[in-house]
Image: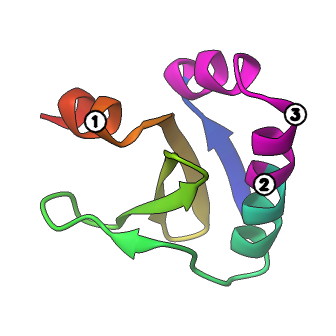
Amino acid sequence: MELFSTSEFDKDYKKSSKEDIKRINMIIEQLKSGILVGKPLRHIKNTFSARVGNKRLVYAIDGNKLTLLLFKSREGVYDYLR
C-alpha cells in the first residue's frame, strides 16, 4: 500500500508527543498490512477516524493508496472537516 500525507497531517505529527507518534506509527503499520483501524466517517466516503489518546487520526483509503489527512483533537477534526 502506498502511503501519502497532507501538509496538515505533517504539521500535526511534528507537534505530537513521542507517545502519540509511537501510537500513530503502530496504526500506520496495521493499515499497511491491510487491517482497518477506527471507525468510518459517515459523510465522507472511504475515510476513517482512529482514536489516539484524546486525539483522532483521520485517514482515507482509495484502492492501494493510504492518505493520512489529520491528527487533531476530536473537536478540531470535526470543525476542520465541516
Determine whether the residue tagged by mark 2 lies in a helix, strand or loop. Answer: helix
Q: Position of residue 36 (x, y in %)?
A: 57, 80
What is the three-letter code of the residue carrying label 1? Glu
64 relative to 70 in the view: left or right: right
Which labelled disc corresponds to residue 18? 3
User: Relative to 77, is 24 above or below?
Assistant: below
What is the three-letter code of the residue carrying label 2? Arg
Question: Mark 2 and mark 3: span between their CA atoms?
Answer: 9 Å
Say which quadrant the N terminus sits in: bottom right
Q: How crowded is mark 1: few (under 14 residues within 10 Å), some or many (20 or more)?
A: few
Which labelled disc corresponds to residue 75? 1
Question: Mark 1 and mark 3: span between their CA atoms?
Answer: 22 Å
Determine whether the residue tagged by mark 1 lies in a helix, strand or loop. Answer: helix
At 51% across and 62% down in the image, what residue appears?
A: 50
- According to the image, label 2 marks what residue? 23
81 relative to 70 in the view: left or right: left
What is the three-letter code of the residue carrying label 3? Lys
Q: Where is residue 21 in the image (x, y as percent from the top left)?
A: 81, 40
Check if mark 2's residue and mark 3's residue have beta carbons within 8 Å: no
Question: Mark 2 and mark 1: span between their CA atoms?
Answer: 20 Å
Mark 1 or 3 closer to N-term?
3
User: Relative to 58, is 71 above or below?
Assistant: above
At 79% across and 79% down in the image, what residue appears?
A: 33
9 relative to 18 in the view: left or right: left
Q: Residues within 10 Å of mark 2 (few under 14, many from 20)?
A: some
